[in-house]
Amino acid sequence: MLLELFPYLSALLIEEVERRPDRVVFRARVRAATAVCGCGESSARVHGRYIRRLRDAAVGGLGVVIKLCVRRFRCENPVCPAVTCAEQVAGLTTPHSRYTPLMRGMLTQIGLALAGRAGARLAIAMGITVGTDTLLRLVRAVPEPDVGEVEVLGVDDFAFRKGRHYGTVLIDMATHRPIHLYDGREGEDLAAWLRGHPEMKVICRDRSRGYGEGARVGAPQAQQVADRYHLWANLGQAVEKTVNAHRSHLVEPLAAAESGAGHLEAEPEVVQPSKELKIVTRLREQHAAAHELWQQGMSKAAIGRKLGLHQATVRKLVNARSADDVVAKNLQRAHVVTRTSATCTGVGMRASGTPPSSTARSSNSAIPGVSWLFSATCGATGPGADTHPTRDRSLYRSARSPPGS
């Protein structure tokens, strides 16, 4: 009956089963009289014994511990450098492991699904006591899947720390899964990766020059296409700048009641612009102050120290021809991109009617442990994001994101 419940214990001789308040303890030893060394030599000379504790999957809400009496054998091969070897039970033990394969597999799946703290809490509810570091270590030990051939590649950047440290994520657009991450946004790194994949046909990327040059050098045969999200973003910026520049020329039409035959045509009133947001006023003041100091010959670093701004913000302000350019870049997402990219997931957007160029955007089925990285590729959209037009989070960060995508 016991072997029917625990078939992987068939190679053991169960000497005792002890039930404790929180666990079940099996005391056992190996049935075989010999063991095979790592060199392939079989030996029956016992050198010594020790007790090995193995934790197994819980049964009935109780943890299972196997106290296994392990023999160490002396290898009879004179050229073997090991001299002695400990016996291993197929399907039950692995060198230096404190978990059975069944237990290790369960903990690995818990770690992949919930990571450290949440996974440890779930394991306790299942009768398994495990630490957060152990779960994370098991996740890191999972071998990376084989990349295989990639014909349609998605390329985008993500922020380790917004405005400071960026990296690049590569997505297989056929499977919608990330296949590679590297630090930085340099085109040389992208070109080096592409040289190892000559099967590349389409590269779907943002409009960064570095990525464009890397794709051209590393995969000259591939067709480069701009993803839908960045096309909408660029269109939104252009429309926002145009509307802001001509807002004062917009007028309200005359009422129908005033357009009678005997009514004198009156001069239309100019529509007064709405009251500016505080962030817009601050951006205009920062732009004016930065340009004034720049014309005085101060460096960007000196301007940043004087105004108390990050160097990336100073660079954006100095490079902008007018304050409206800076304002439009910060406000356009709240009016255009937030609504049009509502279905944006992963590296870009997933929409029906995907163009023939296979530029479908990836989903959130990311490699466990790195799924949090891909929210940066979709702006403020996604689960839990605030899409209210007057509460866009980009309004409250005064131009801290450097240009590039």
Image (cartoon, rainbow, N blue to C red):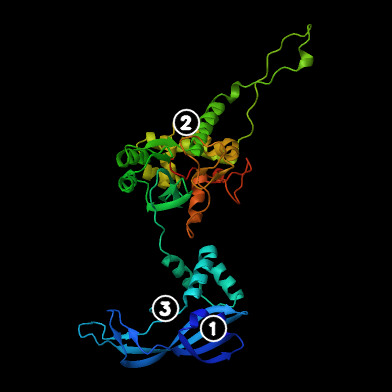
263 or 79: nearer the eye?
79
The earlier-in-sequence mark between 1 and 2 is 1
Q: Nearer the viewer, residue 378 or 15?
A: 15
The secondary element bearing badge 1 is classed as helix
Residue 304 location, quadrant: top left
Q: Amino acid at mark 3?
A: Ala
Question: Residue placed at 59% from the left, 89% from the top?
Answer: 20
Q: Which residue is mark 1?
A: 3
Find residue 392 and report its horizontal and vertical position in percent.
59, 44
Query: Can you give x and y, in whole percent of width and height, for residue 85 in the image?
Result: 32, 85
Q: Residues under labels 1 and 3: Cα distance? A: 15 Å
- Residue at label 3? 90
Name the image quarter holding residue 45. bottom left
Q: Locate the C terminus and report the quarter of the image it occupies.
A: top left
Q: CA distance from mark 1 to mark 2?
A: 79 Å
Front tag of 1 and 3:
1
Q: Which residue is mark 2?
A: 322
Residue 30 x %, y %: 43, 88
- Mark 2 neighbour density, 10 Å: few (under 14) some (14–19) many (20 or more): some
Q: Looking at this view, is 387 or 177 the one in front?
A: 177
Q: Residue at x 47, y 68 (%)?
A: 136
Circle 1 packing at 10 Å, graded few (<14), some (14-19), many (20+), is few
Q: Position of residue 166 (x, y in %)?
A: 41, 50
Secondary element type, mark 2: loop
Label 2, label 3: how far apart the Cα atoms are: 72 Å
Q: Secondary structure at mark 3?
A: loop
Camera-side mark, 1 or 2? 1
Q: Alpha-carbon neighbours of circle 3 within 10 Å: few (<14), some, or many (≥20)?
A: few
